[in-house]
Amino acid sequence: MADPRYHHGNLRAALLDAGFALARAGGPLRLQVRELAAAESVSPSAVYRHFPDLAHLRADVARLAREALAREMQTAADAIPSDLVAGERAIRRFQAIGAAYLAFAAREPQLFDTAFMATEAPPSCEDAPSAWEVLLDALQQLVATGEMAPARLADAPLIAWSSVHGAASMLAGNLLPADLPDGVVRTAVLDGVLRALGVRAPDSRAPNTPSAVPAASGSAPLASRATLQ
């Protein structure tokens, strides 16, 4: 007899939730049809009634992981005080999203790997929210407040993303020396991006940029791991 939880067609959402939890615990390798079916007490054939194949399911779990990252970035940006001078606030919001990106990778290495794993199928819908769009909005605010030249919008997204993502990948993979002082990676990367984009350093008298943000609403507690302070 079918599980009554799924009479109203919510097995697809339940499987994605289970996939997110499995990815958080063990990364992309945990995303297997049999393990997902077992997590929801259904048969593997029930999984295939909601996803054409494993590739499509993995693509949507990766999307959920990216959306979790994007929410943390947006939360960090929104936490910057609104009473700062416009240009100062734009710079600190830009730094905050980078700090959140690094913090997410350090705290959630398996989920970070899942977010950017190679997939053989597209997700069922676009990321919402989108980490890329959060970045673009922060860069546009730098231009709007006169803190970055408009011409830099052509290359700024790639410069910022590749710099921060590279450092985040090293954090997620434990590839950096263990004796690096707290905050060195974050400061070096974020200050380096500002210099590359021709943006001034923020006013040291203003509140410090948050180094980490809470988990996205509704997510499980973050795994124990060294975080950026």
Image (cartoon, rainbow, N blue to C red):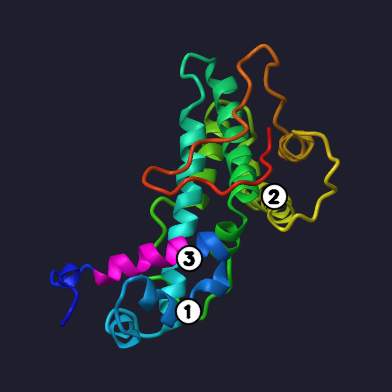
Picture coordinates of residue 139, whole percent (x, y) = 57, 39
Q: Are marks 1 and 2 in contact (CB under 8 Å)?
A: no
Distance CA(mark 1)–CA(mark 2): 35 Å
Under mark 3, the amino acid is Leu
Q: Quadrant of the C terminus?
A: top right
Which disc is residue 22 wearing?
3
* Residue highlighted by disc 1: 32
Q: Is residue 133 visible?
A: no
Local SS, label 2:
helix
Q: Nearer the viewer, mark 1 or mark 2?
A: 1
Residue shown at 27% from the left, 84% from the top: 49
Which disc is residue 159 wearing?
2
Camera-side residue: 66 or 10? 10
Picture coordinates of residue 40, whole percent (x, y) = 32, 71
63 over 174 or under it: above or below: below
Q: Give, as a single range, the part of the protein colored magenta.
A: 11-22
Whether the magenta-drawn stretch holds residue 18 is answered as yes
Picture coordinates of residue 55, whole percent (x, y) = 46, 80
Distance CA(mark 3)–CA(mark 1): 9 Å
Crowd tier of the residue under label 3, counting other residues whose Cα lies within 10 Å: few below 14, some 14–19, many 20 or above: many
Q: Are marks 3 and 2 in contact (CB under 8 Å)?
A: no
